[in-house]
Amino acid sequence: MATITVRDLARSYGAVRAVDGITFSVAEGEVFALLGPNGAGKTTTVEILEGYRGRDTGTVEVLGFDPATGGSAYRERIGVVLQSAGFEEEFTVRELVRLQAGLYPRRHDPDELIDLVGLADKRNTRVKGLSGGQRRRLDLALGLAGAPDLLFLDEPTTGFDPAARHHAWDLVASLRDLGTTILLTTHYLEEAQRLADRVGVLRSGRLVAVGTPEELRAASDLPTKISFRLPGKAAATDLPKLSTVPRPAGDRLVLASREPVWDTWRLTGWAASHDVPLADLTVAPPSLEDVYLTLTGERDDDR
Ligand SMILES: Nc1ncnc2c1ncn2[C@@H]1O[C@H](COP(=O)(O)OP(=O)(O)OP(=O)(O)O)[C@@H](O)[C@H]1O
Ligand SMILES: [Mg+2]
Protein backbone atom coordinates (compact mmCIF):
# COMPACT_ATOMS: atom_id res chain seq x y z
CA MET A 1 0.00 0.00 0.00
CA ALA A 2 1.27 3.47 -0.84
CA THR A 3 1.83 5.86 2.05
CA ILE A 4 2.65 8.73 -0.30
CA THR A 5 1.12 9.21 -3.74
CA VAL A 6 2.10 12.26 -5.78
CA ARG A 7 0.69 12.91 -9.24
CA ASP A 8 1.66 15.75 -11.61
CA LEU A 9 2.67 17.98 -8.72
CA ALA A 10 3.77 21.51 -9.63
CA ARG A 11 4.68 24.63 -7.69
CA SER A 12 6.16 27.89 -8.96
CA TYR A 13 7.59 30.91 -7.20
CA GLY A 14 6.99 33.71 -9.65
CA ALA A 15 8.74 32.66 -12.83
CA VAL A 16 10.67 29.82 -11.13
CA ARG A 17 9.06 26.42 -11.62
CA ALA A 18 10.49 24.90 -8.45
CA VAL A 19 8.53 21.65 -8.91
CA ASP A 20 7.58 21.03 -12.49
CA GLY A 21 5.12 18.14 -12.72
CA ILE A 22 6.41 15.19 -10.72
CA THR A 23 4.80 11.81 -10.11
CA PHE A 24 6.00 9.19 -7.65
CA SER A 25 4.85 7.07 -4.75
CA VAL A 26 6.37 5.72 -1.56
CA ALA A 27 5.19 2.38 -0.19
CA GLU A 28 4.38 1.78 3.45
CA GLY A 29 7.58 0.98 5.35
CA GLU A 30 9.81 2.18 2.54
CA VAL A 31 12.76 4.56 2.83
CA PHE A 32 12.74 6.89 -0.18
CA ALA A 33 15.52 9.42 -0.84
CA LEU A 34 15.08 12.52 -2.96
CA LEU A 35 18.38 13.57 -4.50
CA GLY A 36 19.24 16.58 -6.62
CA PRO A 37 21.46 19.64 -6.82
CA ASN A 38 20.85 22.84 -4.84
CA GLY A 39 17.59 24.39 -5.97
CA ALA A 40 16.30 21.21 -7.68
CA GLY A 41 13.02 21.33 -5.72
CA LYS A 42 13.59 18.81 -2.92
CA THR A 43 12.59 21.02 0.01
CA THR A 44 9.63 22.44 -1.89
CA THR A 45 8.38 18.91 -2.59
CA VAL A 46 8.93 17.76 0.99
CA GLU A 47 7.23 20.82 2.47
CA ILE A 48 4.20 20.37 0.22
CA LEU A 49 3.91 16.78 1.46
CA GLU A 50 4.28 17.94 5.05
CA GLY A 51 1.44 20.41 4.54
CA TYR A 52 3.65 23.42 5.17
CA ARG A 53 3.59 24.73 1.63
CA GLY A 54 0.83 25.02 -0.94
CA ARG A 55 0.88 23.55 -4.43
CA ASP A 56 -0.30 24.98 -7.72
CA THR A 57 -1.51 21.82 -9.42
CA GLY A 58 -1.45 18.05 -9.01
CA THR A 59 -2.76 15.60 -6.44
CA VAL A 60 -1.05 14.52 -3.25
CA GLU A 61 -2.22 11.85 -0.84
CA VAL A 62 -0.23 11.03 2.29
CA LEU A 63 -1.44 8.50 4.88
CA GLY A 64 -4.87 8.88 3.29
CA PHE A 65 -4.89 12.67 3.78
CA ASP A 66 -4.45 15.65 1.51
CA PRO A 67 -1.69 17.40 3.48
CA ALA A 68 -3.08 20.81 2.48
CA THR A 69 -6.31 20.15 4.39
CA GLY A 70 -5.34 17.31 6.77
CA GLY A 71 -5.00 19.58 9.81
CA SER A 72 -3.92 18.25 13.17
CA ALA A 73 -5.23 14.71 12.51
CA TYR A 74 -2.64 14.53 9.75
CA ARG A 75 0.18 16.31 11.57
CA GLU A 76 -0.11 14.02 14.60
CA ARG A 77 0.96 11.12 12.43
CA ILE A 78 4.00 12.64 10.78
CA GLY A 79 7.41 13.65 12.06
CA VAL A 80 9.30 16.48 10.45
CA VAL A 81 12.95 17.45 10.41
CA LEU A 82 13.14 20.68 8.43
CA GLN A 83 16.22 21.72 6.48
CA SER A 84 16.54 24.74 8.74
CA ALA A 85 14.50 25.15 11.86
CA GLY A 86 14.37 28.18 14.10
CA PHE A 87 14.70 27.34 17.77
CA GLU A 88 13.83 29.04 20.99
CA GLU A 89 17.41 29.71 21.97
CA GLU A 90 16.73 30.07 25.69
CA PHE A 91 15.13 26.64 26.13
CA THR A 92 17.20 23.67 27.19
CA VAL A 93 17.35 20.51 25.07
CA ARG A 94 15.17 18.67 27.56
CA GLU A 95 12.56 21.43 27.74
CA LEU A 96 12.21 21.58 23.96
CA VAL A 97 11.91 17.83 23.50
CA ARG A 98 9.33 17.63 26.29
CA LEU A 99 7.33 20.49 24.81
CA GLN A 100 7.37 18.89 21.38
CA ALA A 101 6.38 15.46 22.70
CA GLY A 102 3.54 17.12 24.62
CA LEU A 103 1.93 18.09 21.32
CA TYR A 104 1.30 14.48 20.37
CA PRO A 105 -1.20 11.98 21.74
CA ARG A 106 1.27 9.17 21.07
CA ARG A 107 4.81 10.06 22.05
CA HIS A 108 8.27 8.80 22.85
CA ASP A 109 9.85 9.33 26.23
CA PRO A 110 11.77 12.63 25.89
CA ASP A 111 14.78 11.47 27.88
CA GLU A 112 15.11 8.28 25.88
CA LEU A 113 14.96 10.31 22.67
CA ILE A 114 17.70 12.60 23.90
CA ASP A 115 19.85 9.57 24.66
CA LEU A 116 18.99 8.05 21.28
CA VAL A 117 20.31 11.04 19.30
CA GLY A 118 23.44 11.25 21.44
CA LEU A 119 22.68 14.42 23.40
CA ALA A 120 22.63 12.86 26.87
CA ASP A 121 25.35 15.15 28.16
CA LYS A 122 23.61 18.22 26.69
CA ARG A 123 20.22 17.51 28.26
CA ASN A 124 20.25 20.69 30.35
CA THR A 125 22.17 22.88 27.92
CA ARG A 126 20.35 25.82 26.38
CA VAL A 127 19.91 25.64 22.61
CA LYS A 128 22.14 28.68 22.11
CA GLY A 129 24.99 26.66 23.62
CA LEU A 130 24.81 23.82 21.08
CA SER A 131 27.11 23.34 18.10
CA GLY A 132 25.68 23.10 14.57
CA GLY A 133 25.79 19.31 14.53
CA GLN A 134 24.27 19.11 18.01
CA ARG A 135 21.38 21.31 16.86
CA ARG A 136 20.83 18.94 13.97
CA ARG A 137 20.67 16.04 16.44
CA LEU A 138 18.11 18.00 18.41
CA ASP A 139 16.12 18.46 15.18
CA LEU A 140 16.10 14.69 14.81
CA ALA A 141 14.87 14.17 18.37
CA LEU A 142 12.08 16.70 17.81
CA GLY A 143 11.07 14.99 14.57
CA LEU A 144 10.75 11.68 16.38
CA ALA A 145 8.92 13.02 19.44
CA GLY A 146 5.45 12.04 18.24
CA ALA A 147 6.34 8.43 17.33
CA PRO A 148 5.40 9.15 13.70
CA ASP A 149 4.18 6.63 11.11
CA LEU A 150 5.90 8.73 8.47
CA LEU A 151 9.07 10.72 8.95
CA PHE A 152 10.30 13.54 6.70
CA LEU A 153 14.02 14.22 6.94
CA ASP A 154 15.32 17.16 4.90
CA GLU A 155 19.11 16.79 4.83
CA PRO A 156 19.14 15.20 8.29
CA THR A 157 22.89 14.71 8.63
CA THR A 158 24.27 17.91 7.12
CA GLY A 159 26.90 19.20 9.53
CA PHE A 160 27.32 15.87 11.33
CA ASP A 161 30.78 14.57 12.01
CA PRO A 162 31.45 11.11 10.50
CA ALA A 163 30.71 9.22 13.73
CA ALA A 164 27.46 11.13 14.28
CA ARG A 165 26.45 10.40 10.70
CA HIS A 166 26.98 6.68 11.16
CA HIS A 167 25.01 6.87 14.39
CA ALA A 168 22.14 8.64 12.58
CA TRP A 169 22.19 5.98 9.87
CA ASP A 170 21.81 3.29 12.50
CA LEU A 171 18.93 5.24 13.98
CA VAL A 172 17.15 5.56 10.64
CA ALA A 173 17.75 1.86 9.96
CA SER A 174 16.18 0.91 13.28
CA LEU A 175 13.19 3.16 12.61
CA ARG A 176 12.76 1.44 9.27
CA ASP A 177 12.92 -1.92 11.01
CA LEU A 178 10.08 -0.74 13.25
CA GLY A 179 8.00 -0.04 10.13
CA THR A 180 8.33 3.75 9.90
CA THR A 181 8.04 5.08 6.36
CA ILE A 182 10.75 7.66 5.67
CA LEU A 183 11.14 10.32 3.00
CA LEU A 184 14.56 11.93 3.16
CA THR A 185 16.62 14.30 1.10
CA THR A 186 20.38 14.23 1.06
CA HIS A 187 23.45 15.41 -0.79
CA TYR A 188 25.43 12.43 0.50
CA LEU A 189 25.25 9.64 -2.03
CA GLU A 190 26.66 7.18 0.46
CA GLU A 191 23.78 8.04 2.77
CA ALA A 192 21.26 7.36 0.01
CA GLN A 193 23.03 4.12 -0.89
CA ARG A 194 22.98 2.95 2.74
CA LEU A 195 19.51 3.98 3.75
CA ALA A 196 17.23 4.19 0.76
CA ASP A 197 15.20 1.36 -0.71
CA ARG A 198 14.57 3.63 -3.67
CA VAL A 199 15.81 7.03 -4.76
CA GLY A 200 14.33 9.75 -6.96
CA VAL A 201 16.64 12.20 -8.72
CA LEU A 202 15.32 15.74 -9.21
CA ARG A 203 16.76 18.12 -11.75
CA SER A 204 15.26 21.58 -12.18
CA GLY A 205 11.95 20.50 -10.67
CA ARG A 206 11.63 17.33 -12.71
CA LEU A 207 12.15 13.74 -11.66
CA VAL A 208 14.73 12.39 -14.07
CA ALA A 209 14.99 8.92 -12.53
CA VAL A 210 13.29 6.78 -9.89
CA GLY A 211 14.36 3.34 -8.78
CA THR A 212 16.56 1.31 -6.48
CA PRO A 213 20.23 2.35 -6.54
CA GLU A 214 20.93 -0.90 -8.38
CA GLU A 215 18.29 -0.18 -11.02
CA LEU A 216 19.68 3.30 -11.60
CA ARG A 217 23.16 1.90 -11.92
CA ALA A 218 22.07 -0.78 -14.36
CA ALA A 219 20.11 1.75 -16.45
CA SER A 220 22.98 4.22 -16.54
CA ASP A 221 25.11 2.40 -19.10
CA LEU A 222 28.26 3.90 -17.58
CA PRO A 223 31.59 2.13 -18.04
CA THR A 224 33.45 0.11 -15.43
CA LYS A 225 36.41 1.96 -13.94
CA ILE A 226 39.73 0.16 -13.94
CA SER A 227 42.33 2.10 -12.03
CA PHE A 228 45.92 1.48 -10.94
CA ARG A 229 49.31 3.08 -10.36
CA LEU A 230 52.35 2.34 -12.46
CA PRO A 231 55.78 2.18 -10.84
CA GLY A 232 58.25 4.91 -11.86
CA LYS A 233 60.12 2.61 -14.22
CA ALA A 234 57.04 1.96 -16.41
CA ALA A 235 55.30 4.51 -18.62
CA ALA A 236 51.73 4.59 -19.90
CA THR A 237 53.12 4.07 -23.40
CA ASP A 238 54.48 0.66 -22.29
CA LEU A 239 50.97 -0.63 -21.61
CA PRO A 240 49.44 -3.23 -23.92
CA LYS A 241 46.63 -2.23 -26.28
CA LEU A 242 43.43 -1.86 -24.28
CA SER A 243 39.83 -1.20 -25.33
CA THR A 244 40.36 2.50 -24.69
CA VAL A 245 43.21 4.78 -23.67
CA PRO A 246 43.73 5.17 -19.91
CA ARG A 247 43.62 8.73 -18.61
CA PRO A 248 45.82 10.06 -15.83
CA ALA A 249 43.97 11.05 -12.65
CA GLY A 250 46.39 12.28 -9.99
CA ASP A 251 49.06 9.62 -9.63
CA ARG A 252 46.78 6.94 -11.08
CA LEU A 253 45.69 5.82 -14.50
CA VAL A 254 41.98 5.26 -15.03
CA LEU A 255 40.41 3.26 -17.80
CA ALA A 256 36.70 3.76 -18.51
CA SER A 257 36.13 0.30 -19.86
CA ARG A 258 33.25 -1.20 -21.81
CA GLU A 259 35.09 -4.51 -21.86
CA PRO A 260 36.31 -4.88 -18.28
CA VAL A 261 37.01 -8.61 -18.42
CA TRP A 262 39.11 -8.33 -21.55
CA ASP A 263 40.92 -5.18 -20.35
CA THR A 264 41.65 -6.63 -16.90
CA TRP A 265 43.00 -9.80 -18.50
CA ARG A 266 45.25 -7.85 -20.92
CA LEU A 267 46.46 -5.55 -18.19
CA THR A 268 47.19 -8.15 -15.53
CA GLY A 269 48.72 -10.53 -18.11
CA TRP A 270 51.06 -7.78 -19.25
CA ALA A 271 51.90 -6.80 -15.67
CA ALA A 272 52.65 -10.40 -14.65
CA SER A 273 54.84 -11.11 -17.67
CA HIS A 274 56.78 -7.85 -17.32
CA ASP A 275 56.95 -8.06 -13.55
CA VAL A 276 55.23 -4.68 -13.12
CA PRO A 277 53.32 -4.25 -9.87
CA LEU A 278 49.97 -2.56 -10.58
CA ALA A 279 49.64 -0.90 -7.20
CA ASP A 280 46.10 -0.43 -5.89
CA LEU A 281 44.50 -2.09 -8.88
CA THR A 282 40.73 -1.70 -8.65
CA VAL A 283 37.94 -2.71 -10.98
CA ALA A 284 34.76 -0.92 -9.97
CA PRO A 285 31.26 -0.64 -11.41
CA PRO A 286 29.90 2.91 -11.69
CA SER A 287 29.07 4.29 -8.27
CA LEU A 288 25.72 5.82 -7.37
CA GLU A 289 27.61 9.11 -7.38
CA ASP A 290 28.72 8.60 -11.00
CA VAL A 291 25.15 7.76 -11.96
CA TYR A 292 23.79 10.75 -10.05
CA LEU A 293 26.23 13.18 -11.65
CA THR A 294 25.31 11.88 -15.08
CA LEU A 295 21.58 12.20 -14.41
CA THR A 296 21.93 15.74 -13.10
CA GLY A 297 24.22 16.76 -15.95
CA GLU A 298 27.09 17.52 -13.61
CA ARG A 299 29.45 14.75 -14.62
CA ASP A 300 32.96 15.62 -15.53
CA ASP A 301 34.27 12.81 -17.71
CA ASP A 302 37.80 13.20 -16.42
CA ARG A 303 36.81 12.11 -12.95
N1 LIG B 1 10.10 30.82 -0.61
C1 LIG B 1 10.62 30.89 -1.83
N2 LIG B 1 10.45 31.98 -2.60
C2 LIG B 1 10.96 32.04 -3.85
N3 LIG B 1 11.66 31.05 -4.44
C3 LIG B 1 11.86 29.94 -3.72
C4 LIG B 1 11.37 29.81 -2.38
N4 LIG B 1 11.72 28.59 -1.92
C5 LIG B 1 12.43 28.01 -2.91
N5 LIG B 1 12.51 28.81 -3.99
C6 LIG B 1 13.18 28.47 -5.28
O1 LIG B 1 12.65 27.23 -5.72
C7 LIG B 1 13.68 26.39 -6.25
C8 LIG B 1 13.71 25.07 -5.47
O2 LIG B 1 14.11 25.33 -4.14
P1 LIG B 1 14.19 24.16 -3.05
O3 LIG B 1 14.44 24.81 -1.75
O4 LIG B 1 12.99 23.30 -3.17
O5 LIG B 1 15.49 23.36 -3.56
P2 LIG B 1 16.28 22.17 -2.86
O6 LIG B 1 16.32 21.07 -3.87
O7 LIG B 1 15.72 21.86 -1.54
O8 LIG B 1 17.75 22.78 -2.74
P3 LIG B 1 18.89 22.57 -1.60
O9 LIG B 1 19.64 21.33 -1.99
O10 LIG B 1 19.75 23.79 -1.78
O11 LIG B 1 18.24 22.51 -0.28
C9 LIG B 1 14.96 27.21 -6.17
O12 LIG B 1 15.17 27.81 -7.42
C10 LIG B 1 14.66 28.24 -5.11
O13 LIG B 1 15.40 29.41 -5.35
MG1 LIG C 1 16.47 21.93 0.36
Image (cartoon, rainbow, N blue to C red):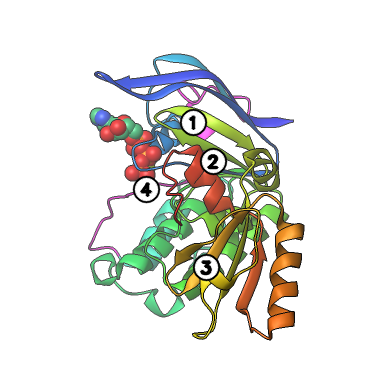
- Camera-side mark, 2 or 3: 3
Residue bearing the label numbered 2: 78
Which residue is depicted at the point 28% across and 65% down? 127
Which residue is depicted at the point 49% across and 85% down? 232
Around disc 4, counting alpha carbons within 10 Å, would you say few (fewer than 14), some (14 to 19), or many (20 or more)? Answer: some
Which residue is depicted at the point 53% across and 39% down? 76
Q: Nearer the viewer, residue 136 or 248?
A: 248
Q: Distance between the residues labelled 1 and 4?
A: 14 Å
Image quadrant where residue 33 sits: top right
Which numbered disc, 2 or 3, marks the residue that appears first in the sequence?
2
Q: What residue type is labelled 2?
A: Ile
Q: Nearer the viewer, residue 227 or 157?
A: 227
Q: Does the residue labelled 4 lie within 8 Å of ligand 2?
A: yes
Cβ–Cβ below 8 Å for labels 2 and 4?
no
Which numbered disc, 2 or 4, marks the residue that appears first in the sequence?
2
- Camera-side mark, 1 or 2: 1
Give the main secondary structure of the magenta stretch: loop
Q: Distance between the residues labelled 3 and 4?
A: 40 Å
Residue bearing the label numbered 3: 253
Around disc 3, counting alpha carbons within 10 Å, would you say few (fewer than 14), some (14 to 19), or many (20 or more)? Answer: some
Give, as a single range, the part of the protein colored magenta.
Answer: 62-91
The picture places residue 5, in percent across and down from the top left corner, at: 61, 25
Residue bearing the label numbered 1: 49
Rendered position, 66 above or below 98: above
Image quadrant where residue 264 sits: bottom right
Numbered disc 4: secondary structure: loop
Cβ–Cβ below 8 Å for labels 1 and 2?
no
Which numbered disc, 1 or 2, marks the residue that appears first in the sequence?
1
Can the viewer see residue 176?
A: yes
